[in-house]
Each structure stands twice: as C-alpha cells, then as structure tokens.
Amino acid sequence: MNIWVAFGVLSVGVIIWFMLIRRLNTRSWERHGSSAHVRSARGDIGEVEIPPARIALWVFLAVITSLFGLFISAYFIRMGHGHGAMHGITDWRSVSKPPILWLNTGMLVLSGAAMQWARHAVKLNQRGRVAGFWFAGGAFAVLFLVGQLIAWQQLRDSGYGLTSGPAGAFFYVLTGVHGLHLLGGLAVWLKTMLRVRSREVELIEVRLSIQLCTVYWHYLLLVWLVMFALLLST
C-alpha cells in the first residue's frame, strides 16, 4: 500500500472522527443518563433504554478499529511481508525508537487509571475526588501528547524525517493518528471537567459522560500498547 493511500485512509478516518465527536459532545449524554437512572431508581423492569451516545461510541470504536487495522496491515505489507514480498519490496529500514516512548506509555497508563478512579468516585457521589482524578487523567494525557512530540523531534534529530523512508513515515502516521484521536477525546474531557466543577450540575448528570470517556481512554491505551509492541518488534 502506497503511503499516499495511507494518508487518504487517514483523511477519511479524521472526517468520520470529527462527525462522531460532534455527536458525542451533545448533552444528550447527560439527559439520557439521567432518565435511565430515574427509571432504574423507580424499579421499573422490562424497559431498558440504551443511551444513543453509548451506541455512537461503540460504532466509533468499530470505525477506528478498522482504521488502525488498515494501517497495521499496510505496515506489514510495506515491510515486505505477504504481497509486499511478492513484489520485491526490500527498501524497508527500521528506525531507532526514542526511549521516551516508554515514559509516554507510563503517562497513558496513569491517565487511564486516574479516569477509572474518577468513574468509581462518581458512584460514591464524591465530587472532590471526581474532579481531582478527572483533572489528573487529562493532565497525564496532555503529558503523553507532549512526550510524543518530543519523540518526533528526537527521531528527526536522528535523521529520520517523514520522507526519509517508509519505516519513518509509518511511525509518524501511526503515532499521529493515535494522537489525533486522543486530542479529540481531550475536547470531551475538558467539557466534562467544566461541568464537574460547576456546582449547578449534579454528578449524576455527568456520570454517563465520565463512563464513556473512560471507556474511550482504555480503548486508546489498548491501541497504543498494540502499536508500541508492533514498533518495538519491527
């Protein structure tokens, strides 16, 4: 797969990402979350309403799973495996992986853990702990993105630019696509953070937002671990 085809797939993925993020940003998260909670509290059985935002998230995760699957397949083909080997592709030269990637991985793990703790604190109705853990989750995610930019700079300083070869190009594309998805998640995180800190908003109104955002963070962590293992092994 040509690198320009990969960029074309990336562009389509970004468009779909933007459209779905707009859907996930709507306040129907809180409205449907509240109504479902009230129905459950009354003990009504037989009517289970799945919030549209939850369905939208799973559809979104399916889309980006396909996107990353395409990139990983292209990665192996371009390396010279499968059909690539049949076409005599031999120009693959592995790039040295910046050591800061290990630190970045730790930042993303801490980010997901903090959000999970915030999710648990919501169930206990502990606004202070929710705000603290939620802020920490976003802060660690920002540190991860900053670390990725530093990794790019270190890679360029080592002589591996975007056009230096297919291995370097794929490194930038894979980490860049992942970073874009995390950046989109931070937009939802920020909106939820503002609502959590507002005394005019009950915690139950942001419960679904925190749940879905946490699931999204765990998913991005899983994707990164797969990508990181792939980059290290090749």
Image (cartoon, rainbow, N blue to C red):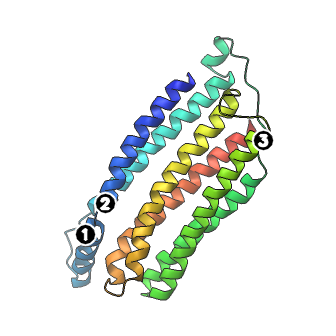
Amino acid type, label 3: Asp
The residue drawn where x is 72% and y is 52% is 101
Gap in angstroms between the C-alphas marked 3 and 2: 43 Å
Gap in angstroms between the C-alphas marked 1 and 2: 9 Å
* Element under disc 1: helix
In this figure, what is the number of numbered marks? 3
Question: What residue does disc 2 label?
Answer: 53
Question: What residue does disc 3 label?
Answer: 157
* Element under disc 3: helix
Q: Check the image and report above or below for 185 versus 81.
A: below
Q: Residue 136 carries which label?
A: none
Q: Which of marks 1 and 2 is nearer the N terminus?
A: 1
Gap in angstroms between the C-alphas marked 1 and 3: 50 Å
Q: Which of marks 3 and 2 is nearer the N terminus?
A: 2
Label pair 1/3, CB-CB below 8 angstroms: no
Q: In which quarter of the image is residue 21?
A: bottom left
Label pair 1/2, CB-CB below 8 angstroms: yes
Residue 4 x %, y %: 52, 25
* Element under disc 2: helix
